[in-house]
Amino acid sequence: MTTFNQQVGGSTYSFDGLVDLLAKATPARSGDELAGCAAHSDAERAAAQWALADVSLTTFLTDLVVPYEDDEVTRLIIDSHDRGAFAAVSHLTVGGLRDWLLEVAAGPDPGTRLRAVSPGLTPEMVAAVSKIMRNQDLIAVSRAITVTSAFRTTIGLPGHLATRLQPNHPTDDPRGIAAATLDGLLLGCGDAVIGINPATDSPQATADLLHLLDEVRRRYDIPAQSCVLSHVTTTLELIEAGAPVDLVFQSIAGTEGANSGFGVNVSLLREANEAGRSLKRGTVGDNVMYLETGQGSALSANAHLGTGGRPVDQQTLEVRAYGLARTLEPLLVNTVVGFIGPEYLFDGKQIIRAGLEDHFCGKLLGLPMGVDVCYTNHAEADQDDMDTLLTLLGVAGAAFVITVPGADDVMLGYQSLSFHDALYARQVLGLRPAPEFEDWLRRLGMVSSNGRIVPVDAAASPLRELTVT
Protein backbone atom coordinates (compact mmCIF):
# COMPACT_ATOMS: atom_id res chain seq x y z
CA MET A 1 0.00 0.00 0.00
CA THR A 2 1.45 3.33 -1.06
CA THR A 3 1.83 6.06 1.54
CA PHE A 4 1.30 9.57 0.18
CA ASN A 5 3.13 12.42 1.89
CA GLN A 6 2.59 16.13 1.40
CA GLN A 7 4.24 19.09 3.09
CA VAL A 8 2.12 22.19 3.67
CA GLY A 9 3.21 25.22 5.69
CA GLY A 10 6.04 23.45 7.42
CA SER A 11 3.94 20.42 8.39
CA THR A 12 4.07 17.02 6.69
CA TYR A 13 0.83 15.09 6.25
CA SER A 14 0.80 11.37 5.53
CA PHE A 15 -2.06 9.44 3.90
CA ASP A 16 -2.18 5.69 4.27
CA GLY A 17 -3.07 4.53 0.78
CA LEU A 18 -5.34 5.77 -2.01
CA VAL A 19 -8.55 5.16 -0.04
CA ASP A 20 -7.35 7.40 2.77
CA LEU A 21 -6.08 10.04 0.35
CA LEU A 22 -9.38 10.23 -1.54
CA ALA A 23 -11.34 10.53 1.68
CA LYS A 24 -9.16 13.25 3.17
CA ALA A 25 -9.23 15.23 -0.10
CA THR A 26 -13.04 15.36 -0.16
CA PRO A 27 -14.70 18.70 0.57
CA ALA A 28 -16.16 18.64 4.07
CA ARG A 29 -19.32 16.63 4.65
CA SER A 30 -20.92 15.11 7.69
CA GLY A 31 -21.16 11.58 6.29
CA ASP A 32 -17.40 11.22 6.06
CA GLU A 33 -17.08 12.51 9.61
CA LEU A 34 -19.63 9.88 10.67
CA ALA A 35 -17.60 7.20 8.87
CA GLY A 36 -14.38 8.39 10.50
CA CYS A 37 -12.54 9.07 7.25
CA ALA A 38 -12.79 12.87 6.87
CA ALA A 39 -9.86 15.25 7.06
CA HIS A 40 -9.29 16.57 10.58
CA SER A 41 -8.59 20.13 9.45
CA ASP A 42 -8.72 22.38 6.41
CA ALA A 43 -4.93 22.18 6.27
CA GLU A 44 -5.01 18.38 6.07
CA ARG A 45 -7.72 18.54 3.40
CA ALA A 46 -5.63 20.98 1.35
CA ALA A 47 -2.57 18.72 1.71
CA ALA A 48 -4.59 15.72 0.56
CA GLN A 49 -5.93 17.58 -2.47
CA TRP A 50 -2.41 18.68 -3.35
CA ALA A 51 -1.12 15.13 -3.08
CA LEU A 52 -4.10 13.73 -5.01
CA ALA A 53 -3.45 16.14 -7.87
CA ASP A 54 -0.06 14.47 -8.40
CA VAL A 55 -1.42 10.91 -8.58
CA SER A 56 -1.19 9.33 -12.05
CA LEU A 57 -4.48 8.23 -13.59
CA THR A 58 -2.96 4.81 -14.29
CA THR A 59 -2.72 4.29 -10.52
CA PHE A 60 -6.48 3.87 -10.35
CA LEU A 61 -6.32 0.80 -12.61
CA THR A 62 -4.07 -1.12 -10.21
CA ASP A 63 -4.58 0.45 -6.78
CA LEU A 64 -8.26 -0.39 -6.38
CA VAL A 65 -10.45 1.39 -3.88
CA VAL A 66 -12.59 -1.72 -3.30
CA PRO A 67 -10.86 -5.08 -3.95
CA TYR A 68 -11.55 -6.76 -7.29
CA GLU A 69 -11.97 -10.22 -5.80
CA ASP A 70 -14.49 -9.02 -3.20
CA ASP A 71 -16.84 -6.79 -5.17
CA GLU A 72 -18.74 -7.26 -8.43
CA VAL A 73 -19.05 -3.51 -8.99
CA THR A 74 -15.26 -3.26 -9.00
CA ARG A 75 -15.05 -6.18 -11.41
CA LEU A 76 -17.60 -4.51 -13.70
CA ILE A 77 -15.67 -1.23 -13.63
CA ILE A 78 -12.31 -2.82 -14.40
CA ASP A 79 -13.53 -5.41 -16.91
CA SER A 80 -15.50 -2.83 -18.92
CA HIS A 81 -12.74 -0.23 -18.93
CA ASP A 82 -12.00 1.03 -22.46
CA ARG A 83 -8.22 1.31 -22.68
CA GLY A 84 -8.44 2.69 -26.20
CA ALA A 85 -10.48 5.66 -25.01
CA PHE A 86 -8.20 6.02 -21.99
CA ALA A 87 -5.13 6.43 -24.20
CA ALA A 88 -5.91 10.11 -24.82
CA VAL A 89 -5.44 10.93 -21.11
CA SER A 90 -3.42 7.99 -19.80
CA HIS A 91 -0.30 10.14 -19.42
CA LEU A 92 -2.04 12.60 -17.10
CA THR A 93 -2.22 12.99 -13.35
CA VAL A 94 -5.46 13.88 -11.55
CA GLY A 95 -4.43 17.53 -11.66
CA GLY A 96 -3.53 17.19 -15.31
CA LEU A 97 -6.97 15.74 -16.03
CA ARG A 98 -8.59 18.76 -14.40
CA ASP A 99 -6.57 21.09 -16.61
CA TRP A 100 -7.35 18.99 -19.70
CA LEU A 101 -11.09 18.96 -18.98
CA LEU A 102 -11.21 22.73 -18.54
CA GLU A 103 -9.17 23.27 -21.70
CA VAL A 104 -11.42 20.99 -23.74
CA ALA A 105 -14.57 22.57 -22.29
CA ALA A 106 -13.37 26.00 -23.40
CA GLY A 107 -12.29 24.85 -26.85
CA PRO A 108 -13.95 23.82 -30.12
CA ASP A 109 -16.33 20.83 -30.22
CA PRO A 110 -15.96 19.91 -26.53
CA GLY A 111 -18.87 17.48 -26.57
CA THR A 112 -17.26 15.16 -29.10
CA ARG A 113 -13.91 15.11 -27.32
CA LEU A 114 -15.41 14.54 -23.88
CA ARG A 115 -17.71 11.76 -25.13
CA ALA A 116 -14.74 10.05 -26.76
CA VAL A 117 -12.73 9.88 -23.55
CA SER A 118 -15.63 9.03 -21.23
CA PRO A 119 -15.45 5.19 -21.58
CA GLY A 120 -11.78 5.37 -20.64
CA LEU A 121 -12.41 7.05 -17.30
CA THR A 122 -13.17 4.95 -14.25
CA PRO A 123 -15.49 6.25 -11.55
CA GLU A 124 -12.58 6.60 -9.15
CA MET A 125 -10.68 8.81 -11.62
CA VAL A 126 -13.73 10.99 -12.07
CA ALA A 127 -14.40 11.18 -8.32
CA ALA A 128 -10.76 12.12 -7.74
CA VAL A 129 -10.72 14.97 -10.24
CA SER A 130 -14.00 16.37 -8.91
CA LYS A 131 -12.43 16.69 -5.44
CA ILE A 132 -9.88 19.24 -6.68
CA MET A 133 -12.32 21.26 -8.79
CA ARG A 134 -14.09 24.44 -7.76
CA ASN A 135 -17.84 24.73 -8.24
CA GLN A 136 -17.33 26.81 -11.37
CA ASP A 137 -15.03 24.11 -12.79
CA LEU A 138 -17.71 21.48 -12.24
CA ILE A 139 -20.31 23.68 -13.92
CA ALA A 140 -18.12 24.65 -16.89
CA VAL A 141 -17.17 21.07 -17.77
CA SER A 142 -20.67 19.70 -17.15
CA ARG A 143 -22.16 22.29 -19.48
CA ALA A 144 -19.78 21.23 -22.25
CA ILE A 145 -20.92 17.58 -22.13
CA THR A 146 -23.97 16.37 -24.03
CA VAL A 147 -25.53 13.04 -23.06
CA THR A 148 -28.91 12.07 -24.50
CA SER A 149 -31.33 9.21 -23.96
CA ALA A 150 -34.82 8.57 -25.26
CA PHE A 151 -38.05 6.63 -24.77
CA ARG A 152 -41.13 8.71 -25.68
CA THR A 153 -39.24 11.93 -25.11
CA THR A 154 -35.60 12.83 -25.70
CA ILE A 155 -33.69 13.67 -22.54
CA GLY A 156 -30.47 15.68 -22.21
CA LEU A 157 -30.46 17.86 -25.31
CA PRO A 158 -28.58 21.16 -24.93
CA GLY A 159 -30.87 24.04 -24.05
CA HIS A 160 -33.48 21.77 -22.48
CA LEU A 161 -34.40 20.96 -18.87
CA ALA A 162 -36.79 18.07 -18.34
CA THR A 163 -38.74 17.34 -15.17
CA ARG A 164 -40.01 14.36 -13.28
CA LEU A 165 -43.58 15.00 -12.19
CA GLN A 166 -43.83 13.26 -8.79
CA PRO A 167 -47.51 13.00 -7.74
CA ASN A 168 -46.97 10.95 -4.57
CA HIS A 169 -49.84 10.37 -2.15
CA PRO A 170 -49.69 8.91 1.38
CA THR A 171 -52.39 6.33 0.59
CA ASP A 172 -51.97 6.09 -3.20
CA ASP A 173 -55.43 7.65 -3.56
CA PRO A 174 -56.23 7.96 -7.30
CA ARG A 175 -57.94 11.35 -6.85
CA GLY A 176 -54.95 12.80 -5.04
CA ILE A 177 -52.54 11.45 -7.64
CA ALA A 178 -54.71 12.74 -10.50
CA ALA A 179 -54.94 16.20 -8.92
CA ALA A 180 -51.15 16.40 -8.48
CA THR A 181 -50.61 15.15 -12.01
CA LEU A 182 -52.97 17.78 -13.40
CA ASP A 183 -51.17 20.47 -11.41
CA GLY A 184 -47.82 19.44 -12.85
CA LEU A 185 -48.95 19.05 -16.44
CA LEU A 186 -50.59 22.49 -16.42
CA LEU A 187 -47.20 23.95 -15.44
CA GLY A 188 -45.32 22.07 -18.14
CA CYS A 189 -43.83 19.30 -15.99
CA GLY A 190 -43.60 15.57 -16.66
CA ASP A 191 -41.42 15.31 -19.75
CA ALA A 192 -38.72 13.20 -18.05
CA VAL A 193 -41.25 10.90 -16.38
CA ILE A 194 -44.47 10.92 -14.43
CA GLY A 195 -43.19 8.84 -11.54
CA ILE A 196 -44.94 7.72 -8.36
CA ASN A 197 -43.27 6.45 -5.20
CA PRO A 198 -45.90 3.94 -4.06
CA ALA A 199 -46.97 3.89 -0.43
CA THR A 200 -46.47 0.11 -0.41
CA ASP A 201 -44.60 -2.37 -2.58
CA SER A 202 -47.72 -4.45 -3.15
CA PRO A 203 -47.73 -5.83 -6.72
CA GLN A 204 -51.47 -5.20 -7.03
CA ALA A 205 -51.19 -1.61 -5.79
CA THR A 206 -48.29 -1.02 -8.16
CA ALA A 207 -50.27 -2.48 -11.05
CA ASP A 208 -53.24 -0.23 -10.23
CA LEU A 209 -51.01 2.85 -10.31
CA LEU A 210 -49.39 1.77 -13.58
CA HIS A 211 -52.83 1.40 -15.20
CA LEU A 212 -53.89 4.80 -13.83
CA LEU A 213 -50.87 6.59 -15.30
CA ASP A 214 -51.10 4.71 -18.59
CA GLU A 215 -54.78 5.60 -18.94
CA VAL A 216 -54.00 9.29 -18.40
CA ARG A 217 -51.14 9.19 -20.89
CA ARG A 218 -53.18 7.46 -23.58
CA ARG A 219 -56.36 9.49 -23.05
CA TYR A 220 -54.58 12.79 -23.58
CA ASP A 221 -51.95 11.47 -26.00
CA ILE A 222 -49.13 12.70 -23.77
CA PRO A 223 -45.64 12.01 -25.15
CA ALA A 224 -44.20 11.01 -21.79
CA GLN A 225 -43.20 7.90 -19.91
CA SER A 226 -44.62 6.72 -16.60
CA CYS A 227 -43.04 4.79 -13.77
CA VAL A 228 -44.09 3.41 -10.42
CA LEU A 229 -40.95 3.20 -8.34
CA SER A 230 -41.42 -0.27 -6.89
CA HIS A 231 -38.60 -2.77 -6.39
CA VAL A 232 -37.22 -4.20 -9.59
CA THR A 233 -38.44 -7.71 -8.72
CA THR A 234 -41.99 -6.38 -8.41
CA THR A 235 -41.68 -4.69 -11.79
CA LEU A 236 -40.36 -7.90 -13.38
CA GLU A 237 -43.34 -9.77 -11.97
CA LEU A 238 -45.70 -7.16 -13.41
CA ILE A 239 -44.02 -7.28 -16.82
CA GLU A 240 -44.69 -11.02 -16.85
CA ALA A 241 -48.33 -10.31 -15.92
CA GLY A 242 -48.76 -7.87 -18.82
CA ALA A 243 -48.92 -4.61 -16.85
CA PRO A 244 -48.22 -1.40 -18.84
CA VAL A 245 -44.62 -0.89 -17.68
CA ASP A 246 -42.70 1.92 -19.38
CA LEU A 247 -39.62 2.33 -17.20
CA VAL A 248 -37.95 -0.10 -14.82
CA PHE A 249 -36.87 1.62 -11.62
CA GLN A 250 -34.26 0.67 -9.05
CA SER A 251 -32.11 2.33 -6.41
CA ILE A 252 -28.46 1.33 -6.77
CA ALA A 253 -25.21 1.93 -4.90
CA GLY A 254 -21.46 1.73 -5.42
CA THR A 255 -20.59 -1.55 -3.72
CA GLU A 256 -21.81 -5.11 -4.02
CA GLY A 257 -22.73 -5.12 -0.33
CA ALA A 258 -24.84 -1.97 -0.57
CA ASN A 259 -26.65 -3.29 -3.65
CA SER A 260 -27.29 -6.51 -1.79
CA GLY A 261 -28.96 -4.39 0.87
CA PHE A 262 -31.22 -3.04 -1.89
CA GLY A 263 -31.95 -6.63 -2.93
CA VAL A 264 -30.25 -6.42 -6.32
CA ASN A 265 -27.10 -7.46 -8.15
CA VAL A 266 -25.65 -6.81 -11.58
CA SER A 267 -27.26 -9.88 -13.13
CA LEU A 268 -30.74 -8.94 -11.91
CA LEU A 269 -30.38 -5.39 -13.20
CA ARG A 270 -29.34 -6.64 -16.61
CA GLU A 271 -32.30 -9.01 -16.67
CA ALA A 272 -34.63 -6.12 -15.83
CA ASN A 273 -33.16 -3.96 -18.58
CA GLU A 274 -33.71 -6.71 -21.14
CA ALA A 275 -37.25 -7.34 -19.90
CA GLY A 276 -38.19 -3.66 -20.14
CA ARG A 277 -36.76 -3.35 -23.63
CA SER A 278 -38.57 -6.48 -24.78
CA LEU A 279 -41.91 -4.63 -24.38
CA LYS A 280 -40.90 -2.14 -27.11
CA ARG A 281 -43.13 0.59 -25.68
CA GLY A 282 -40.79 3.47 -26.55
CA THR A 283 -41.48 5.59 -29.62
CA VAL A 284 -38.26 7.57 -30.06
CA GLY A 285 -35.82 5.32 -28.17
CA ASP A 286 -35.41 2.18 -26.08
CA ASN A 287 -33.71 3.39 -22.89
CA VAL A 288 -35.92 1.89 -20.19
CA MET A 289 -34.02 2.01 -16.89
CA TYR A 290 -34.63 4.67 -14.24
CA LEU A 291 -31.90 4.54 -11.58
CA GLU A 292 -31.65 6.51 -8.35
CA THR A 293 -28.57 6.99 -6.18
CA GLY A 294 -27.52 9.09 -3.20
CA GLN A 295 -24.38 9.87 -1.26
CA GLY A 296 -24.36 7.89 1.99
CA SER A 297 -26.35 4.85 0.90
CA ALA A 298 -23.37 2.48 1.26
CA LEU A 299 -22.58 3.84 4.71
CA SER A 300 -26.22 3.36 5.74
CA ALA A 301 -25.91 -0.30 4.71
CA ASN A 302 -22.54 -0.67 6.51
CA ALA A 303 -21.13 -1.61 3.10
CA HIS A 304 -18.66 1.24 2.70
CA LEU A 305 -15.33 -0.40 3.54
CA GLY A 306 -12.64 -0.67 0.90
CA THR A 307 -9.08 -1.92 0.51
CA GLY A 308 -7.42 -2.59 3.84
CA GLY A 309 -10.76 -2.37 5.63
CA ARG A 310 -10.68 1.42 5.42
CA PRO A 311 -13.90 3.42 5.02
CA VAL A 312 -14.30 4.81 1.51
CA ASP A 313 -15.65 8.35 1.32
CA GLN A 314 -19.29 8.62 0.33
CA GLN A 315 -18.72 10.64 -2.82
CA THR A 316 -16.31 8.08 -4.32
CA LEU A 317 -18.80 5.32 -3.59
CA GLU A 318 -21.56 7.41 -5.16
CA VAL A 319 -19.59 7.76 -8.39
CA ARG A 320 -18.96 4.01 -8.44
CA ALA A 321 -22.75 3.64 -8.64
CA TYR A 322 -22.61 5.69 -11.84
CA GLY A 323 -20.06 3.21 -13.20
CA LEU A 324 -22.68 0.50 -12.71
CA ALA A 325 -25.46 2.68 -14.11
CA ARG A 326 -23.75 3.45 -17.40
CA THR A 327 -23.53 -0.24 -18.33
CA LEU A 328 -27.37 -0.34 -18.23
CA GLU A 329 -27.85 2.53 -20.72
CA PRO A 330 -30.61 4.18 -18.64
CA LEU A 331 -33.12 6.78 -19.69
CA LEU A 332 -32.78 8.60 -16.37
CA VAL A 333 -30.35 8.67 -13.46
CA ASN A 334 -30.68 11.03 -10.54
CA THR A 335 -29.02 11.54 -7.21
CA VAL A 336 -31.42 12.27 -4.36
CA VAL A 337 -28.79 14.65 -3.12
CA GLY A 338 -30.19 15.82 0.22
CA PHE A 339 -32.77 13.11 0.82
CA ILE A 340 -30.83 10.82 3.16
CA GLY A 341 -30.42 13.57 5.74
CA PRO A 342 -27.95 15.79 7.60
CA GLU A 343 -26.05 12.77 8.87
CA TYR A 344 -24.54 12.62 5.36
CA LEU A 345 -24.90 16.18 4.02
CA PHE A 346 -25.30 18.53 6.95
CA ASP A 347 -26.33 21.85 5.48
CA GLY A 348 -27.12 23.80 2.33
CA LYS A 349 -23.46 24.35 1.50
CA GLN A 350 -22.71 20.62 1.58
CA ILE A 351 -25.86 19.78 -0.38
CA ILE A 352 -25.06 22.32 -3.11
CA ARG A 353 -21.49 21.07 -3.45
CA ALA A 354 -22.58 17.43 -3.53
CA GLY A 355 -25.27 18.14 -6.13
CA LEU A 356 -22.75 19.78 -8.46
CA GLU A 357 -20.23 16.95 -7.90
CA ASP A 358 -22.80 14.23 -8.56
CA HIS A 359 -24.08 15.91 -11.71
CA PHE A 360 -20.56 16.49 -13.06
CA CYS A 361 -19.39 12.95 -12.31
CA GLY A 362 -22.46 11.27 -13.74
CA LYS A 363 -22.42 13.35 -16.89
CA LEU A 364 -18.68 12.84 -17.46
CA LEU A 365 -19.25 9.09 -17.17
CA GLY A 366 -21.85 9.28 -19.94
CA LEU A 367 -25.13 9.39 -18.02
CA PRO A 368 -28.26 11.49 -18.67
CA MET A 369 -27.83 12.92 -15.19
CA GLY A 370 -30.52 14.59 -13.14
CA VAL A 371 -30.76 15.71 -9.53
CA ASP A 372 -33.49 15.63 -6.93
CA VAL A 373 -32.78 19.09 -5.50
CA CYS A 374 -33.97 18.35 -2.00
CA TYR A 375 -33.43 18.31 1.75
CA THR A 376 -35.02 16.87 4.87
CA ASN A 377 -36.62 19.15 7.42
CA HIS A 378 -34.00 18.42 10.09
CA ALA A 379 -31.12 19.54 7.83
CA GLU A 380 -29.56 22.99 8.09
CA ALA A 381 -30.94 23.97 4.70
CA ASP A 382 -33.90 25.82 3.26
CA GLN A 383 -35.61 26.58 -0.02
CA ASP A 384 -33.20 29.42 -0.78
CA ASP A 385 -30.42 26.81 -0.91
CA MET A 386 -32.52 24.78 -3.31
CA ASP A 387 -33.07 27.84 -5.51
CA THR A 388 -29.31 28.26 -5.68
CA LEU A 389 -28.64 24.63 -6.57
CA LEU A 390 -31.45 24.53 -9.15
CA THR A 391 -30.06 27.62 -10.86
CA LEU A 392 -26.50 26.26 -10.88
CA LEU A 393 -27.68 22.92 -12.27
CA GLY A 394 -29.65 24.70 -14.99
CA VAL A 395 -26.49 26.55 -16.00
CA ALA A 396 -24.52 23.29 -15.84
CA GLY A 397 -26.90 21.53 -18.24
CA ALA A 398 -28.65 19.05 -15.96
CA ALA A 399 -30.86 16.62 -17.86
CA PHE A 400 -33.79 16.85 -15.45
CA VAL A 401 -34.93 17.72 -11.95
CA ILE A 402 -37.70 16.35 -9.75
CA THR A 403 -40.81 18.42 -9.01
CA VAL A 404 -43.63 17.90 -6.50
CA PRO A 405 -46.73 19.95 -5.60
CA GLY A 406 -45.68 22.96 -3.55
CA ALA A 407 -42.11 21.62 -3.16
CA ASP A 408 -43.40 19.45 -0.28
CA ASP A 409 -43.65 15.69 -0.74
CA VAL A 410 -46.40 14.73 1.70
CA MET A 411 -45.77 11.00 1.30
CA LEU A 412 -41.98 10.83 1.62
CA GLY A 413 -41.83 13.75 4.05
CA TYR A 414 -39.08 15.85 2.50
CA GLN A 415 -38.68 19.11 0.59
CA SER A 416 -37.92 19.10 -3.13
CA LEU A 417 -38.71 21.50 -5.98
CA SER A 418 -42.16 22.71 -6.97
CA PHE A 419 -43.59 22.77 -10.47
CA HIS A 420 -43.26 26.56 -10.30
CA ASP A 421 -39.54 26.22 -9.54
CA ALA A 422 -39.01 24.37 -12.81
CA LEU A 423 -40.99 27.08 -14.61
CA TYR A 424 -38.67 29.68 -13.07
CA ALA A 425 -35.52 27.85 -14.17
CA ARG A 426 -36.74 27.44 -17.71
CA GLN A 427 -37.77 31.09 -17.99
CA VAL A 428 -34.69 32.78 -16.53
CA LEU A 429 -32.19 30.45 -18.23
CA GLY A 430 -34.00 30.12 -21.55
CA LEU A 431 -34.43 26.36 -21.21
CA ARG A 432 -37.16 24.30 -22.84
CA PRO A 433 -38.95 21.03 -22.16
CA ALA A 434 -38.10 17.89 -24.12
CA PRO A 435 -39.01 18.63 -27.76
CA GLU A 436 -41.72 15.98 -28.08
CA PHE A 437 -43.38 17.19 -24.88
CA GLU A 438 -43.07 20.84 -25.92
CA ASP A 439 -44.90 20.05 -29.17
CA TRP A 440 -47.73 18.56 -27.10
CA LEU A 441 -47.84 21.62 -24.84
CA ARG A 442 -47.97 23.82 -27.93
CA ARG A 443 -50.99 21.89 -29.21
CA LEU A 444 -52.69 22.66 -25.88
CA GLY A 445 -51.90 26.36 -26.25
CA MET A 446 -49.42 26.31 -23.39
CA VAL A 447 -46.34 27.56 -25.26
CA SER A 448 -45.98 31.19 -26.30
CA SER A 449 -44.40 32.42 -29.50
CA ASN A 450 -41.05 32.88 -27.73
CA GLY A 451 -41.09 29.29 -26.44
CA ARG A 452 -42.09 30.01 -22.85
CA ILE A 453 -44.56 27.87 -20.93
CA VAL A 454 -47.84 29.71 -20.40
CA PRO A 455 -49.89 28.35 -17.48
CA VAL A 456 -53.55 27.93 -18.35
CA ASP A 457 -56.78 27.74 -16.40
CA ALA A 458 -57.47 24.13 -15.43
CA ALA A 459 -61.19 24.59 -16.08
CA ALA A 460 -60.49 25.60 -19.67
CA SER A 461 -57.96 22.88 -20.39
CA PRO A 462 -58.62 19.58 -22.17
CA LEU A 463 -56.96 18.05 -19.08
CA ARG A 464 -59.78 19.18 -16.77
CA GLU A 465 -61.27 15.67 -16.62
CA LEU A 466 -58.22 14.57 -14.66
CA THR A 467 -59.73 16.19 -11.59
CA VAL A 468 -62.35 13.45 -11.43
CA THR A 469 -60.27 10.47 -12.60
Image (cartoon, rainbow, N blue to C red):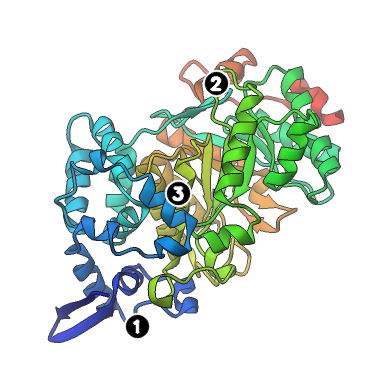
Q: Nearer the viewer, residue 411 or 240?
A: 240
Q: Residue sitting at 74 percent across and 53 percent down?
A: 410
Left/right of residue 297 with respect to residue 314 in the rendered view = right
- Marked residue nearer the N-terminal end (3 or 2): 3
Residue 146 placed where, x, y %? Answer: 36, 33
Q: CA distance from mark 3 to mark 1?
A: 28 Å
Residue 381 in sight here:
no
Figure quadrant of residue 208: top right
Q: From mark 3 to mark 2, how far is it between C-alphas?
A: 29 Å
Q: Secondary structure at mark 3?
A: helix
Please name the amino acid that badge 3 sits on. Tyr
Q: Nearer the viewer, mark 1 or mark 2?
A: 1
Single out the mark in the foreground, 3 or 2.
Answer: 3
Q: Nearer the viewer, residue 362 or 30?
A: 362
- At label 2, the amino acid type is Glu
| The label number, if any, that marks residue 322 in the structure image | 3
**Residue 438: percent from left, percent from top:** 55, 21
Q: Relative to residue 394, is residue 200 depicted above or below?
A: below
Q: Secondary structure at mark 1?
A: loop
**Which element is circle 2 on?**
helix
Q: Is residue 253 above or below residue 112?
A: below
Q: Is residue 264 above or below residue 219?
A: below
Q: Could you classify mark 3 by the number of other residues whose Cα lies within 10 Å: few (under 14), some (14-19), or many (20 or more)? A: many
Q: Which mark is residue 252?
A: none
Query: In the image, residue 130 lies at what x, y percent?
Result: 31, 56
Marks 1 and 2 in Cβ contact (< 8 Å):
no
Report the Cα–Cα distance between label 1 and label 2: 50 Å
